[in-house]
Image: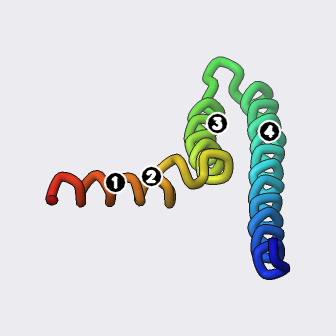
């Protein structure tokens, strides 16, 4: 492998590592904030658990972030797009 290829692969690996770290930070913030909201909910209004709505809504965002990082190119990403283009072109041939 030449230096240019090695450098490009390193940059891609570094970008991926940063994306993974970003997701872990996102997940950690989610746990602490939802945990805090749960405590607040139980102290202020224990008969009605409204915190579930916050956890659900934010959880959808966290899931989408995780899919973009960990499933990346396979989940509606570059590889998926290229596959769909090939399928379309084969049908039209």
Q: CA distance from mark 2 to mark 3?
A: 30 Å
CB atoms of marks 1 and 2 within 8 Å:
yes
Q: Secondary structure at mark 1?
A: helix
Q: Residue 92 lies in what quarter of the image?
A: bottom left
Q: Residue 60 lies in what quarter of the image?
A: top right
Q: Earlier in the sequence, mark 2 or mark 3?
A: 3
Q: Residue 55 lies in what quarter of the image?
A: top right
What residue is drawn where x is 83% and y is 69%?
10
> In the displayed structure, does residue 85 sit left or right of residue 70?
left
* 79 or 57, nearer to the observer: 79
Q: Secondary structure at mark 2?
A: helix
Viewer-side label of 1, 3:
1
Tag 1 residue:
84
Q: Earlier in the sequence, mark 1 or mark 3?
A: 3
Viewer-side label of 2, 3:
2
CB atoms of marks 2 and 3 within 8 Å:
no
Pick the quarter of the image with the N terminus: bottom right
CB atoms of marks 4 and 2 within 8 Å:
no
Please tell me the numbered disc located at residue 55: 3
Q: CA distance from mark 3 to mark 4?
A: 9 Å
Q: Earlier in the sequence, mark 4 or mark 1?
A: 4
Image location (x, y in percent) of residue 23: 75, 51
Q: CA distance from mark 4 to mark 1?
A: 37 Å
Q: Residues within 10 Å of mark 3 (few under 14, many from 20)?
A: some
Residue lying furthest front = 1
Tag 4 residue:
31
Colouring convention used in this rendered image of the protein: rainbow
Image location (x, y in percent) of residue 72: 60, 52
> In the displayed structure, does residue 56 sit left or right of residue 15?
left
């Amino acid at each position: 492998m030449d230096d240019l290829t090695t450098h490009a692969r390193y940059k891609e690996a570094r970008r991926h590592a940063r994306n993974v770290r970003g997701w872990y930070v996102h997940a950690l913030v989610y746990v602490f904030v939802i945990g805090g909201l749960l405590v607040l909910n139980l102290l202020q209004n224990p008969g009605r658990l409204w915190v579930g709505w916050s956890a659900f809504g934010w959880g959808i965002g966290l899931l989408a972030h995780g899919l973009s990082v960990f499933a990346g190119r396979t989940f509606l990403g570059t590889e998926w797009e290229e596959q769909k283009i090939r399928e379309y072109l084969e049908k039209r041939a």
